[in-house]
Amino acid sequence: MEYVSPEGLRLDGRRPMEMRQLRAEIGTVAKANGSAVFEMGNTKVIAAVYGPREVQNRSQQINDQALVRCEYSMANFSTGDRMRKPKGDRRSTEISLVIRQTMEACILTHLMPRSQIDIFVQVLQADGGTRSACINAATLALADAGIPMRDIVTSCSAGYLNSTPLLDLNYIEDSAGGPDVTVGILPKLDKVTLLQMDAKLPVDIFENVMGLAIEGCKAIANYIREVLLENTKQLEYRRGL
Amino acid sequence: MRGLKLPLSQTQRVRLQRAFEKLQSLSAKANSDASLTVADTIPVNYEDAFLKGHGTADLNGELVATVCGVVERVNNLVYVRALRARYKPEVGDVVVGRVVEVAQKRWRLEINFSQDAVLMLSSMNMPDGIQRRRTALDELNMRSIFEENDIVCAEVRNFQHDGSLQLQARSQKYGKLEKGQLLIIDPYLVKKSKQHFHHLEQFGVDLILGRNGYIWIGEHVEARDSMVIDQAKNIEQSTVVEGINQAYTPLEMRQNICRIANAIRVLTSLGFNVDLNLIMETVELSSSLKIDIHDMLGSEFHVLVAEMEAERRSLTTKRKR
């Protein structure tokens, strides 16, 4: 199948190095300490953060740092076709773990000893790149909850189809079976916290694709920063003196 | 962006936007670029000595913020004041909490902190007002003082060396709260002041602005005099108080409580600071316009309150100049 037309356009009309439209909203869950909705094109994810709060299971309590927990789920209506296993499937467990580890790397857990932070993410609409969208939503929700972090984590995916590196794959491109590189970075520290690929690629091409994904991450980071700054300013001026 | 979840008509939207723009222009003069997000560099003069406070971290010799908030400088100390975070206790704060557990000689209270706070049996006045050692019998009767899910008002006493938080309730004004409403709001909206207990005489209502963002609005209770020496008088008085307690709360009182509670709800959903003056102004606005209690949470009243606040702040800034 042809994923990039001779004119250099992808199936949804984007250029190879073009990202989908981003949209973020903070404070969508009233009872949560922090929450956000993050959209990348047709992929839409909601995240809610509770905590730092008292550890629910005393045996899990860590004496010098906070316990970070993450639960990822996909709404049954998020995809067109029916899901085979509704809950507890391997994919969800794996993504939960990935998100937990990525977020734990940036949260300053030692500042909140003997407490727990719960991150809940749910995919409302799936159109490829759910992993990245979940991480971006979780970052926004954590920042909204006022949890101290080293840096914001942003994530973006890139692929390689029809011998062209493509940024931010959608569902059709994702299911083409080509390589799909998901990268998570700390933009300010310039460090990689997440790197996943489920295919083979020659090293030189891989470097290109990863570079493209990192550029995508940086663009997302700029957007997230803008949203957070605008939110902080609003809260501050509304509060008054 | 944090949006209001309200059905606004076209005119209401324009009015609200204008009110917010006015508020923004009023505060923008005071601090224009003090707002920061996570990992933003804090501008400091590196040649001067400075102290890193909360919400800051050192990154390759650069001072960066670790939370979203506003930079504050006190002498040499530089810190970032986080908005919308959980409560950070300070010794002496008045807090309102909910009992989650009755344990050995202590109650555990949920106070919106990263851990549960501890209220020791020995750090509170007994209901009979007598100063004495706590016996095993007192320990068995702990549930007669506070039970699970009771709402309790107390003061932050200290941090233990193991990091747990101790509370105390050594005065008649602290203790169990009954016959009222608990509101949970963001702690950054409650400003520290000299007085957190308010008796609103015209409504007969007690208002407690807990620093942890838990706000209590309840029927006024006369604080019993703790220095009563006459035992018989004491018993008599307590029975009288019990007699009053058994009577139900009158309808008018409940309406007053709800009106004040709704005023606070409106203020918090607009993100305004919650203090006594503003609450009373909002209540007066609602009753002078004869707005029903349940209509106070509607869009029109939100817009009216935003306009009132914009007007009020512009007046106070003019007066200052």
Image (cartoon, coloured by chain):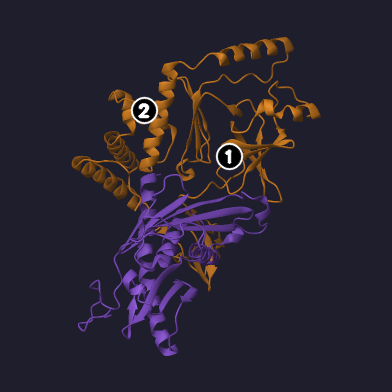
Chain colours: A purple, B orange
Question: Pointer 1 indicates a residue of which chain?
Answer: B
Question: Can you see residue A190?
Answer: no
Give SS at disc 2.
helix
Q: From what the image shows, is residue B130 above or below residue B28?
A: above
Question: Pointer 2 indicates a residue of which chain?
Answer: B
Which residue is label 2 attached to? B283
Mark 2 to mark 1: distance in Å?
Answer: 26 Å
Q: Looking at the image, which is closer to me, A70 or A161?
A: A161
Q: Amino acid at mark 2?
A: Val
On screen, residue B251 versus residue B24, left or right, reads right
Q: From what the image shows, is residue A13 above or below residue A62?
A: below
Which residue is label 1 attached to? B93
Dot 2: few (<14), some (14–19), or many (≥20) neighbours within 10 Å?
many
Q: Looking at the image, which is closer to me, A12 or B201?
A: A12
Quadrant hosting residue A176? bottom left
Residue name at image x 46 percent, y 59 percent: A85
Q: From what the image shows, is residue B230 above or below residue B182?
A: above
Q: Earlier in the sequence, mark 2 or mark 1?
A: 1
Residue B160 percent across, percent down from the top left: 70, 47
Residue B271 percent across, percent down from the top left: 38, 43
Give SS at disc 1.
loop
Residue name at image x 49 percent, y 56 percent: A87
Quadrant hosting residue A31? top left
Report the disc number at residue B265. Answer: none
Residue A205 percent across, percent down from the top left: 40, 87
Residue A133 percent across, percent down from the top left: 40, 64
Query: Closer to the camera: disc 2 or disc 1?
Result: 2
Question: Can you see residue B24?
Answer: yes
